[in-house]
Each structure stands twice: as structure tokens, then as C-alpha cells.
């Protein structure tokens, strides 16, 4: 029989591994929803607290990752509802989270999109999920995911064309 200390140490190592493996990805998702570094950090912390307190059992690492994304997304959306009076962070702060100067204008355009479009863009293009997987994570249909991606692309194209014509 394992001792309580051994069990605790094993759990601690598992949580540390999950934090190390998923924190950057989850932070990007939280930041894209909340547009605020401090709130994104709070949402990330809340996500890992739920991970530790709920101690869910996962089928595999993909199931674990999907669960964490769902919790981070829901936590961020809930925070967003209660923080509607806050403005988005100054774009210059993005350098602190690893965004290059050349990417700031592109990111600024993406941050103007509605949250539901930013989430699917992030999961599809940055995290590499397929529409069916995104649908399962977000509890929407695969058709809704594809439609959101289509609309987000159209909006991005319009905004890029608009800003490109203003630069001339």
C-alpha cells in the first residue's frame, strides 16, 4: 500500500508537469478572451486550481488538454461578464508575452473580433485542432465551428483591406 506522502508527491509532480506543459497555451487563450494580462493570469490560476481540486481522471493527454481548454475558456468568459467595465490592455504590453513587433498589428486586428471568433481561430490555427475537436471542446456543432472560422476570416480580410488602404 502506498503511503499518503508518496501519493501526494506523485500528484504534485503531475500538477507541475501539467502547468509546465499547458500554461503558455492556456494563457494565450485566456488573454485572447480577456484582453488583459492580469485577468488572463487570474483565469489561468483559477483553471489550475480547478484542475487540482476536482482531480478529474482523463482517458489520455488529449482529453486532459481539452478539459483544461474548456475550463480556461469558461473561466475567462465568466470573468469577462463581470469585468465589462475594463478596457483592453495596451498593445505595447504584448511584447512581455512574446509577441513580436511585426505581429502586434495583426494581433490587434484579431483582438477586435468577438470572443467566440477569437477562440476558434486560436484553437484551429495556433493549437492545431480540427473543427470536430473544437466543437467537442466548446460544446457546439462542427458546422458552427466552420461558420465561425469562415466569418472570422471574412472579418479579418475586411479589416486588413481597410487598414491597408488607410496606410496609403
Image (cartoon, helix red, strand yellow):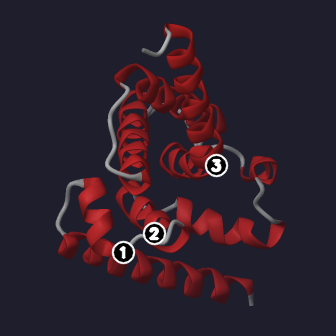
Q: Relative to residue 166, is residue 118 depicted above or below? A: above
Q: In which quadrant is the N terminus drawn?
A: top left
Give the secondary structure at mark 2. Answer: helix
Q: CA distance from mark 3 to mark 2?
A: 16 Å
CB under 8 Å between discs 3 and 2: no
User: What residue is rendered at 62% in x and 32% in y?
Assistant: 16
Where in the figure is residue 19, as x and y percent of width and height? 60, 38
Where in the figure is residue 36, as x and y percent of width and height? 61, 40
User: What residue is rendered at 59% in x and 20% in y?
Assistant: 9
Question: Residue 24: which disc?
Answer: 3
- The residue sitting at the top extreme is 4
Give the secondary structure at mark 1. Answer: loop
Q: In which quadrant is the C terminus drawn?
A: bottom right
Mark 3 or mark 1, earlier in chain: 3
Circle 2 sits on which residue? 121
Q: CA distance from mark 3 to mark 1?
A: 20 Å
Q: CA distance from mark 1 to mark 2?
A: 11 Å
Where in the figure is residue 134, as x and y percent of width and height? 32, 64
User: What residue is rendered at 54% in x and 66% in y?
Assistant: 110
Q: Nearer the viewer, residue 126 or 12?
A: 12
Q: Is the residue marked by circle 2 packed among few (<14), some (14-19), or many (20+) residues within 10 Å?
A: many
Q: Nearer the viewer, residue 138 or 100?
A: 138
Where in the figure is residue 127, as x and y percent of width and height? 51, 66
Circle 1 sits on which residue? 130
Amino acid at each position: 500500500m502506498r503511503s499518503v506522502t508518496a501519493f501526494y508527491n506523485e500528484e504534485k509532480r503531475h500538477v507541475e508537469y501539467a502547468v509546465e506543459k499547458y500554461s503558455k497555451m492556456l494563457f494565450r487563450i485566456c488573454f485572447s478572451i480577456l484582453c488583459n494580462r492580469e485577468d488572463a493570469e487570474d483565469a489561468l490560476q483559477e483553471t489550475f486550481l480547478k484542475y487540482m481540486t476536482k482531480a478529474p481522471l482523463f482517458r489520455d493527454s488529449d482529453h486532459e488538454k481539452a478539459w483544461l481548454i474548456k475550463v480556461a475558456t469558461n473561466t475567462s468568459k465568466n470573468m469577462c461578464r463581470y469585468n465589462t467595465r475594463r478596457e483592453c490592455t495596451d498593445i505595447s504590453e504584448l511584447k512581455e508575452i512574446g509577441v513580436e513587433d511585426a505581429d502586434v498589428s495583426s494581433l490587434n486586428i484579431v483582438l477586435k473580433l468577438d470572443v467566440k471568433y477569437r477562440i476558434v481561430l486560436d484553437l484551429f490555427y495556433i493549437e492545431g485542432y480540427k473543427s470536430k475537436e473544437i466543437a467537442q471542446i466548446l460544446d457546439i456543432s462542427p458546422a458552427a465551428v466552420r461558420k465561425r472560422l469562415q466569418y472570422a476570416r471574412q472579418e479579418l480580410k475586411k479589416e486588413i483591406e481597410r487598414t491597408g488602404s488607410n496606410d496609403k
